[in-house]
Amino acid sequence: MVRAIKGVLITTDPPVKQLILSMNEEQNFLIQDLDETHLLVSADSVEMIKEQLEEELEKNTFTVEF
């Protein structure tokens, strides 16, 4: 019996892809690691990935205050 899973293709640069892969170790949403810039993830986890990625990238952003 064939089992279908609804997924979303994510295209990103390699450093952000590595952040997503490290997030996957905790939540397990990855369906397939396709190549160096593409991932297939479960459709219901896209918003969670966006939110966590935004938080992580915000931590690594330097802002200059005058």
Image: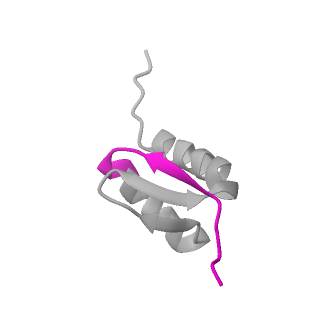
- The verdict on residue 2 being magenta is yes
Q: How many marks?
A: 0
Q: Position of residue 14 (x, y in %)?
A: 31, 51
Q: Residue at x 65, y 76 (%)?
A: 3
Q: Which residue is pictured at 43% across the width and 15% down the height?
A: 66
x then y, percent, for residue 59: 48, 44
User: In the image, what residue occupies the spot 59% across and 52% down?
Assistant: 49
* As drawn, 57 above or below 64: below
The residue lying toward the viewer, choosing from 2 and 6, is 2
Q: Quadrant of the N terminus?
A: bottom right
Magenta part of the chain: 1-16
Looking at the image, the residue that sits furthest to the right is 44
Q: Establish if 14 lies above or below 30.
A: above
Image quarter of residue 11: top left
User: 49 above or below 2?
Assistant: above
Which residue is outermost to the front? 1
Residue 26 appears at what percent x and percent y?
A: 57, 72
Q: Is residue 4 magenta?
A: yes
Q: Residue at x 59, y 45 (%)?
A: 50
Name the one closer to the observer, 21 or 63: 21
